[in-house]
Image (tube, grey):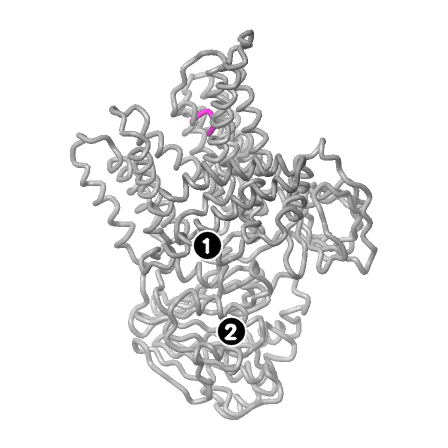
């Protein structure tokens, strides 16, 4: 069973590496292969091919349920219901909406935003909306979050927003709590908010009881990330298993005391524990870790009911199989890998070992196994490993699992009968959580609480897997020290640097904004930091920092913020607090006064590794703030790059008059995102770019880049590319000439739009 499940898993994984799904002819070939393998009884190959077939068919079905391009950007009346808990911030409410009626053929599930709604939006409500939709298009960056992949795995076929001005939204009715677990979760949230209106631990209690982490602040997430305790503030498989175990032993002892032995106490306890596990997993929305835990518990409880023995790895294999059959796209989730690998490591470390070390030593052993065993995975996915995680988890796991979660669930149950009694119980929980939080904050502030490293190559990650198994093997296995050798490539592999006199440049895909990262042999420069509209929409936190961590950047030598518009300065604070920065240059120093900025002025220059950097503008204040943008020219042995930010016709005219032919550059970052107020013909003729790179948002409201501007680019015979269509651009030197590569051309998968 174990080999079959792993073969099925590998088959699914192979399909997820495709840049495009195979055609129908290949689907026929794979189906025929399944029949041949079954006839020849090649069982291991059979499950591999079945995995291929199931992944392809499932993906084809999911891709077919996407919004047609012809329906983008038009008003569409829809009826449907809110399928899960809405996410709220200061500007909008976001929610998944299942369409039940529409004049147009729409995807079955869409994701909507309602800006400044006039009432609270709740799960299970039926609404009539007028919406404007677009395809699930997202930014695509090296090391960044693939929003398109996330929407694809969630079954969302379109995104958009409610148009309250076109037609007033109408609430039609509310689903019954007896027909929807989402309504139960919503009711619990509402009662928790009434019971704990001023509690600082309300967000954590919501996360631990119903899996709603939307109220947890960014600062809290940072502390949990640095201490390696993020898994404790979401409903994980361990929480489900613990609650089921507590219920099992409680019911077992109570049933024995009743003297009613017509039903076996073990069977009654098993059924009750299973019911509680399913209920708790339902409160969490049946996430992948809870699915795995429920399936494993079902096997164990069934074995107790039938008085059969089970083997841990066989149980885990059945759970793996069941999860992947239900949702083959689960392999695209980091949570899937962390959940199954953590349990596998615990089973490998504990099961079948001789001796009885006792609870304390067992806990230390499990903490050691999961911390060390998951570190290659964490380094590969997040480029971070928490060094204080073993200590933090050793203290936090029993506190959360044995005290906070049981008391919180008991409080939720009591809350529906007595709000006063529940408040007193939650007061105890609040005291425990505040004490734990104090400890975690102090651990997170330790100098070496967390280490960052460039993303290791895939081969180094694969080599570390047998290293983990060897390190955690039983005592007596020879040459266990070789495991440390297998870990070395994770740490001592570095990304390739440009040679002296050359640069690598990345124009990041930050929507209707701008952010450019420039690397020389020994230095890093960031030009603009994208936008920020909320904690969840912050280019500095979501795009820049993940990219820089993937590259192994430990310090930024210069940060240039061209001017004070949000689409250029928005992500700066997150970048400044996330990495050491030697110097900040900007034309808007008052907005970054806490970071000792230097005002950028024409004539400032410096040289790094035989590459020349020169600020060409501003020399004197312009009327328009856009024209006051810092204009940077980078000159390398291969040619020049001109970064112009949001300058318009006036600043362009001044640059042509001041510098003339010295503006010439092979690569031009399009002024003002391709606005019709910029990229004048005289300016373009002075620069004579071979490539023009435009940073704009997909279907942005400004219509950038303007068609007249694109016509001028064609007139000077420059090749132009747009991040909205191509994702991030990487510019490097190959064989003495510039090489421009887009993320969608080199690294996109079948779910990404080309």
Which range is magenta? 317-321
C-alpha separation, residue under disc 2 versus residue under disc 1: 21 Å
Which residue corresponds to mark 1? 746
Residue 647 is left or right of residue 191, and the answer is left
Residue, x 46% and y 63% (percent of image)? 544
Residue 213 is left or right of residue 114, and the answer is left
Q: Position of residue 245 (x, y in %)?
A: 47, 27
Under tag 1, what secondary structure?
helix
Q: Which of the two discs, 2 and 1, labels the residue nearer the N terminus?
A: 2
Q: Position of residue 712 (x, y in %)?
A: 61, 76
318 in magenta:
yes
Choose between 688 and 431: the one closer to the eye. 431
User: With respect to residue 27, does 306 lie above or below?
Assistant: above
Q: Residues within 10 Å of mark 1 (few under 14, many from 20)?
A: few
Choose between 530 and 194: the one closer to the eye. 194
Which residue corresponds to mark 2? 669
User: In terms of image quadrants, where is residue 114?
Assistant: bottom right
């Amino acid at each position: 069973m174990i080999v079959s499940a792993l073969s099925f898993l590998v088959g699914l994984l192979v399909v997820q590496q495709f840049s495009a799904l195979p055609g129908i002819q290949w689907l026929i070939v794979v189906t025929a292969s399944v029949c041949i393998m079954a006839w020849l009884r090649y069982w291991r190959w059979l499950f591999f091919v079945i995995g291929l077939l199931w992944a392809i068919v499932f993906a084809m079905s999911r891709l077919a349920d996407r919004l047609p391009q012809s329906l983008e950007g038009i008003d569409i009346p829809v009826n449907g219901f809110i399928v899960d808990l809405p996410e709220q911030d200061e500007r909008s409410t976001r929610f998944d909406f299942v369409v039940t009626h529409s004049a147009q053929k729409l995807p079955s599930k869409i994701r909507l935003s309602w800006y400044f709604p006039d009432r609270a939006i709740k799960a299970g409500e039926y609404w009539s909306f007028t919406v404007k939709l677009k395809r699930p298009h997202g930014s695509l960056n090296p090391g960044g979050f693939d929003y398109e992949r996330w929407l694809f795995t969630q079954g969302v076929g379109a995104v958009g927003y409610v148009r309250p001005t076109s037609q007033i939204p109408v609430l039609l009715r509310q689903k019954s709590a007896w027909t929807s677990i989402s309504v139960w979760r919503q009711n619990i949230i509402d009662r928790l908010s009434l019971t704990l209106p001023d509690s600082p631990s309300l967000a954590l209690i919501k996360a631990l009881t119903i899996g709603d982490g939307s109220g947890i602040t960014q600062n809290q997430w940072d502390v949990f990330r640095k201490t390696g305790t993020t898994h404790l503030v979401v409903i994980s498989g361990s929480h489900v298993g613990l609650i089921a175990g507590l219920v099992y032993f409680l019911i077992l002892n109570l049933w024995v005391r009743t003297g009613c032995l017509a039903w076996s106490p073990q069977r009654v306890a098993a059924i009750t524990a299973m019911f509680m596990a399913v209920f708790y997993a339902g409160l969490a929305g049946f996430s992948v870790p809870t699915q795995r835990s429920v399936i494993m518990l079902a096997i164990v409880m069934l074995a107790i009911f039938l008085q059969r023995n089970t083997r841990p790895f066989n149980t885990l294999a059945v759970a793996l199989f069941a999860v992947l059959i239900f949702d083959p796209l689960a392999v695209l989730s980091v949570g899937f890998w962390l959940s199954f690998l953590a349990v596998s490591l615990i089973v490998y470390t504990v099961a079948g070992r001789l001796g009885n070390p006792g609870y304390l030593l067992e806990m230390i052993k499990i903490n050691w196994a999961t911390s060390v065993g998951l570190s290659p995975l964490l380094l590969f996915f997040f480029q971070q490993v928490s060094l204080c995680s073993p200590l933090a988890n050793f203290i936090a796991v029993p506190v959360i699992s044995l005290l906070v979660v049981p008391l919180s669930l008991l409080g939720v149950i009591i809350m529906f009968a007595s709000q006063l009694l529940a408040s007193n119980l939650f007061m105890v929980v609040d005291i425990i959580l505040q004490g734990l939080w104090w400890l975690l904050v102090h651990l997170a502030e330790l100098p070496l609480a967390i280490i960052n490293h460039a993303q290791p190559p895939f081969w180094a990650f694969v080599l570390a897997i047998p290293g983990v198994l060897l390190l955690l093997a039983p005592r007596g296995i020879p040459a266990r020290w070789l495991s440390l050798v297998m870990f070395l490539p994770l740490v001592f592999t570095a990304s390739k640097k440009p040679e002296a006199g050359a640069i690598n440049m990345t124009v990041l895909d930050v929507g209707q904004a701008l952010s450019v990262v420039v690397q020389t042999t020994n230095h890093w420069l960031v030009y603009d930091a994208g936008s920020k509209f909320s904690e969840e929409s912050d280019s500095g936190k979501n795009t820049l920092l993940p990219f820089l961590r993937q590259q192994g950047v430990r310090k930024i030598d210069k940060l240039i913020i061209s001017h004070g518009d949000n689409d250029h300065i928005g992500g700066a604070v997150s970048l400044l607090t996330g990495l050491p920065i030697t110097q900040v240059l900007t034309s808007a120093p008052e907005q970054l006064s806490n970071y000792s900025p230097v005002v950028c002025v024409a004539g400032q220059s410096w040289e790094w590794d035989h590459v020349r950097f020169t600020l060409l503008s501003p020399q004197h204040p312009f009327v328009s703030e856009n024209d006051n943008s810092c204009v940077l020219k980078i000159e390398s042995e291969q040619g020049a790059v001109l970064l112009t930010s949001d300058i318009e016709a006036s600043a362009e005219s001044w640059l042509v008059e001041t510098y003339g032919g010295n503006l010439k550059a092979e690569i031009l970052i399009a002024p003002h995102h391709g606005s019709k107020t910029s990229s004048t013909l005289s300016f373009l003729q002075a620069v004579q770019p071979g490539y023009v790179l435009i940073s704009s948002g997909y279907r942005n409201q400004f219509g950038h880049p303007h068609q007249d501007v694109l016509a001028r680019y064609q007139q000077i015979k420059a090749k132009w590319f747009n991040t909205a269509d191509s994702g991030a651009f990487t510019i490097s030197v190959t064989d003495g000439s510039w090489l421009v590569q887009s993320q969608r051309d080199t690294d996109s998968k079948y779910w990404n739009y080309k």
